[in-house]
Image (cartoon, rainbow, N blue to C red):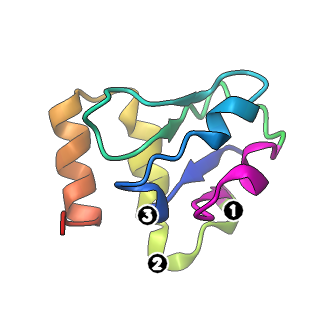
Amino acid sequence: MAYTICEPCVDTKDKACVDVCPVDCIYELEPQERSLYIHPDECIDCNACVPECPVDAIFPNDEVPEKWKSYIEANAQAFHRDSATREAELAKLKPKT
């Protein structure tokens, strides 16, 4: 099981979770992008990031709220897509305000 960063992180990108991750699997792929991402193959399911997230955006994949389930795939694919494609995906999930 991996963890997914969901909608509350979009446009927030608080990096408290990055600081506590023991394996450095949480990434800001490009500074101009709107979200952070957890690498699903690097995550060791330690749960250290969850309580550190000030906006409650991180969930184990099997606990992601229904309204944010699409973030699981977006997070998993983020590491295989370019910046423009990642940002287009996020714009579909959460349009810029």
Q: Which residue is mark 3?
A: 7
Residue 60 horizontal side relative to residue 7, left or right = right
Label 2: few (<14), some (14–19) or many (≥20) C-alpha neighbours in 10 Å? few
Mark 1 or 3: the one toward you: 3
- Residue extent of the magenta highlight: 47-61
The residue type indicated by label 1 comes to Asp
Earlier-in-chain disc, 1 versus 3: 3
Label count reads 3
Give the vertical position of 16 relative to 67 (above or below): above
Q: Residue at x 66, y 24 (%)?
A: 42
Magenta-colored stretch includes residue 58 = yes
Give the vertical position of 36 relative to 82 (above or below): below
Look at the numbered disc 2 and give the secondary structure of its residue: helix
Residue 87 horizontal side relative to residue 70, left or right = left
Spatial separation of the CA atoms under disc 1 and disc 3: 16 Å
The residue type indicated by label 3 comes to Glu
Which numbered tag is attached to residue 62?
Answer: 1
- The quadrant of the image that shows the N terminus is top right
Q: Residue at x 25, y 34 (%)?
A: 32
Q: Residue at x 28, y 29 (%)?
A: 81
Label 1: few (<14), some (14–19) or many (≥20) C-alpha neighbours in 10 Å? few
Do the numbered discs 3 and 2 sit on residues whose CB atoms are within 8 Å? no
- Residue 62 x, y percent position in the rendering: 69, 62
Which numbered tag is attached to residue 67?
Answer: 2
Earlier-in-chain disc, 1 versus 2: 1
Look at the numbered disc 1 and give the secondary structure of its residue: helix
Which numbered tag is attached to residue 73?
Answer: none
Spatial separation of the CA atoms under disc 3 and disc 2: 9 Å
Do the numbered discs 1 and 3 sit on residues whose CB atoms are within 8 Å? no
The residue type indicated by label 2 comes to Lys
Mark 3 or 2: the one toward you: 3
Spatial separation of the CA atoms under disc 1 and disc 2: 13 Å
